[in-house]
């Protein structure tokens, strides 16, 4: 066998391709129109006559080797592609832990408050978070110079006419009274905004749920009984309720509502500052001016309203000491509520 043929044979045997381009180089070198075997055929005429037959045989064997190798290279390239595409799962890997999401404690409290009031016929109303002066203040009997209207409490979007982020969800109650005839029994839960420094006890964004009941002959006794029912449902049957006189522009008379401390049961602890009572919200009889402002005849109808902070209720219920935990999205905090629904 000539040294040349032997070299080519070895080259073919050792040929490897890792992409289409290299396969094409192989094809051009050994199969294409000006392939290297052509030169060997051309050499034939210089080979002595007695060796020509053997020489021809060697070239033919070489040709067969080229074709066979070409098929092998195509196959190896396809295998290579297949390996890259297939995502071979490693069945020996340990499985990933299945993390279950949790309902946010504020959402759970909101839902629970709604469920409790739905049982006694309250529905849910929602309204815009950007409010005009009428719905947030004027209709609710806020005097023109009331401090709540001032910049330190309210985030104004525009001045004159005043447009602001609502400071309470009472604005939703105004909208309900303007658009519905009594009897009205509605809850308005939602986000509210006040221009306050963020601390463990205060935030500039928080959640309220307010309730409104308007009908003929609604009395303060109805208000007390409704809130008494609510407190027992939410905090347990042993809960006692007390009302302290207070002032709000939109209710008359007005009261703050306390419940017996759910931590110490009224014995006194650091949560209730050793008084045995904790405040959960404000309430009162709807001021007749407010009813009239909303187109409801205050001579025929009366009503009560109450409001509470959802953060406050949640903190009492789950003994959470810092309001900021609700908005920090720390999973170590949120994971503690996976059992809530
Ligand atoms: Zn206590």
Image (spheres, rainbow, N blue to C red):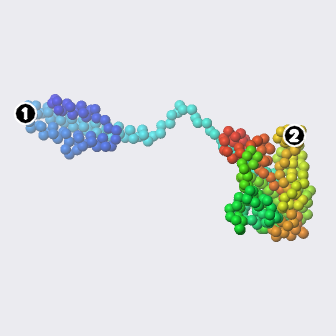
Q: Quadrant of the N terminus?
A: top left
Using the numbered discs, state the Cα–Cα distance from disc 2 to disc 1 in whole angstroms. Answer: 122 Å
**Residue denoted by label 1:** 49
Query: Vertical placement of 341 versus 221: above or below?
Result: above
Residue 121 seen: no
In the picture provided, is 106 more to the left or to the right than 185?
A: left
Locate the C terminus and report the quarter of the image it occupies.
top right
Pointer 2: what residue? Answer: 274
Which image quarter: residue 289? bottom right
**Residue name at image x 44 percent, y 42 percent:** 85
Badge 1 marks a residue whose secondary structure is: helix
Q: Is mark 2 within 8 Å of ligand 1?
A: yes
Q: Residue at x 27, y 42 (%)?
A: 25
Residues packed near mark 2 inside 10 Å, few (<14), some (14 to 19) or many (20 plus): some
Q: How many other residues sit within 10 Å of disc 1, few (<14), some (14-19) or many (≥20)?
A: few
Question: What mark, if any, has residue 228 been given in the picture?
Answer: none
Of residues 189 and 56, the one nearer the viewer is 189
Q: Position of residue 295 (x, y in %)?
A: 82, 70
Residue farthest to the left?
49
Badge 2 marks a residue whose secondary structure is loop
Residue 75: quarter of image: top left
> Residue 283 in the image: x percent, y percent?
85, 56
Q: Position of residue 271 (x, y in %)?
A: 82, 41
């Amino acid at each position: 066998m000539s040294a040349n043929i032997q070299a080519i044979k070895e080259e073919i045997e050792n040929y490897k391709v890792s992409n289409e381009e290299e396969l094409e180089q192989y094809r051009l070198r050994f199969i294409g129109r000006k392939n290297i075997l052509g030169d060997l055929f051309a050499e034939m005429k210089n080979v002595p006559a007695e060796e020509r037959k053997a020489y021809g045989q060697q070239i033919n064997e070489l040709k067969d080797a080229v074709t066979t190798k070409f098929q092998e290279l195509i196959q190896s390239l396809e295998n290579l592609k297949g390996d890259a595409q297939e995502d071979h799962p490693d069945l020996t890997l340990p499985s990933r832990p299945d993390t279950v999401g949790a309902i946010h404690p504020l959402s759970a409290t909101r839902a629970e408050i709604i469920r409790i009031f739905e049982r006694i016929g309250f529905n849910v109303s929602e309204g815009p978070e950007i409010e005009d002066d009428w719905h947030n203040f004027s209709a609710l009997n806020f005097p023109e110079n009331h401090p709540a209207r001032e910049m330190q409490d309210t985030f104004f979007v525009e001045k004159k006419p005043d447009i602001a982020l609502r400071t309470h969800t009472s604005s939703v109650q105004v909208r309900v009274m303007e658009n519905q005839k009594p009897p009205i029994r509605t809850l308005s839960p939602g986000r509210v905004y006040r221009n306050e420094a963020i601390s463990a006890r205060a935030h500039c964004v928080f959640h309220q749920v307010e309730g409104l009941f308007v009908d003929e002959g609604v009395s303060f006794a109805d208000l007390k009984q409704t809130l008494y029912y609510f407190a027992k449902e939410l905090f347990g049957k042993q809960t006692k309720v007390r009302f302290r006189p207070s002032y709000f522009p939109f209710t008359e008379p007005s009261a703050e509502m306390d419940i017996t401390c759910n931590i110490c049961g009224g014995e006194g602890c650091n949560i209730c500052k050793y008084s045995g009572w904790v405040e959960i919200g404000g309430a009162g009889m709807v001021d007749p001016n407010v009813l009239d402002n909303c187109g409801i005849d205050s001579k025929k109808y009366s009503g009560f309203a109450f409001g509470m902070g959802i953060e406050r209720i949640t903190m009492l219920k789950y003994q959470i000491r810092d309001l900021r935990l609700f908005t920090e999205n720390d999973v170590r905090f949120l994971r503690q509520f996976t059992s809530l629904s």
